[in-house]
Image: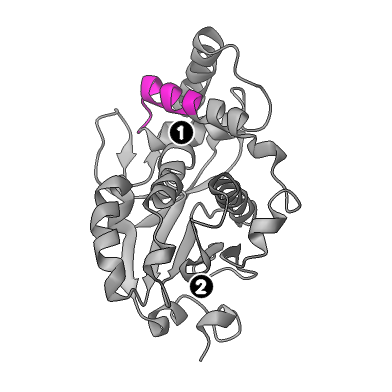
Amino acid sequence: MAVRMYPALGRSVLIPVTTMRCPIRNCKFSVQNCVLDPNKSRKLVLEVKEKLVKDYHSLPLGKNGRDDEDMIYWFLKDRKFSVEDATAKLAKAIKWRHEFGVSTLSQESVKNVAETGKAFVHDFLDVNGRPVLVVMASKHFPAVHDPVENEKLCVFLIEKAMSKLPAGKEEILGIFDLRGFGIENADLKFITFMFDVFYYYYPKRLGDVLFVEAPFIFKPIWQLAKPLLKSYASLVKFCSVEYVKEYFTEATVPANFRS
């Protein structure tokens, strides 16, 4: 795999390239990216903007709105540069962001549920330069915690992780610490919500997903959840604490995974 510079949308972007061809003329296809001539890329971005104005004129403008060209370009890549598919998926994402109130989320607004320690964004990047979202499953109690607050914390942390993406990086690493997991921690509805959020609203942003030291009791939960996770189920790796350490240096490994 080569890495080349393409002046997408008026600036240089690092994009992995393979030799496999996609159906679009002059387009090289990889699992996550499609590379078009800059002029064609720009033309497609403008086509999506025009369709959003015509068909979804009530959607908000600005960052993460219907005129956000970076966001439009990302959804075009996700939908393999299909204007129709990208427009439909993007419109749904923008509407969801507005209704969910993503822009209003803050550390203060999720303070109570965050203090449980059930999830956090790690202070350091992994060895691949990706932000890291850590979930401590044994601290999640669906019978006790407000499900709406759980969802707000989830989205807030995704946004926080995304804000830590270095230039040229596109994915985050998800780590689910399943040590101490019990039936009282099981929450199929929340698992489905979390992966739906990634699938529909943050497509191709979740890289590796590590399920650490999953106990036997987690297996039936996984069998129920797996079909609901769509393509993200293939990203999941069941692993040990020692395996997690391979994603970090000795100085940057999360404290709860140190010996």
Viewer-proximal residue among 188 and 81 = 188
Range of magenta residues = 80-92
The amino acid sitting under disc 2 is Val
Residue name at image x 53 percent, y 36 percent: 8
Numbered label attached to residue 75: 1
The answer, for residue 216, to whether it is visible in the render is yes
Q: Is residue 101 above or below residue 170?
A: above
Residue name at image x 60 percent, y 48 percent: 149
Percent position of residue 7, x then y: 54, 38
Q: Earlier in the sequence, mark 1 or mark 2?
A: 1
Examine the image and state in which quarter residue 85 appears: top left
Secondary element under disc 1, as helix, strand or loop, is helix
**Dots 1 and 2: beta carbons under 8 Å?**
no
Secondary element under disc 2, as helix, strand or loop, is loop
Q: Does residue 114 appear left or right of residue 38 in this picture?
A: right
Which image quarter holds the N terminus?
bottom left
The amino acid sitting under disc 1 is Phe
Q: Is residue 205 above or below residue 22?
A: below
Viewer-proximal residue among 213 and 13 = 213
Percent position of residue 13, x then y: 54, 45
In 3D space, how far apart are the residues under numbered discs 1 and 2 (Cα atoms)? 27 Å
Numbered label attached to residue 127: 2
The answer, for residue 37, to whether it is visible in the render is no
Q: Main secondary structure of the magenta part?
A: helix
Asked which colour scheme the image uses, the reply is one colour
Residue 22 shown in magenta: no
Q: Does residue 79 appear left or right of residue 160 in this picture?
A: left
Residue that protrudes farthest toward the right in the picture: 108
Percent position of residue 253, x then y: 55, 80
Viewer-proximal residue among 215 and 57 = 215
Residue name at image x 37 percent, y 52 percent: 188
Residue 85 shown in magenta: yes
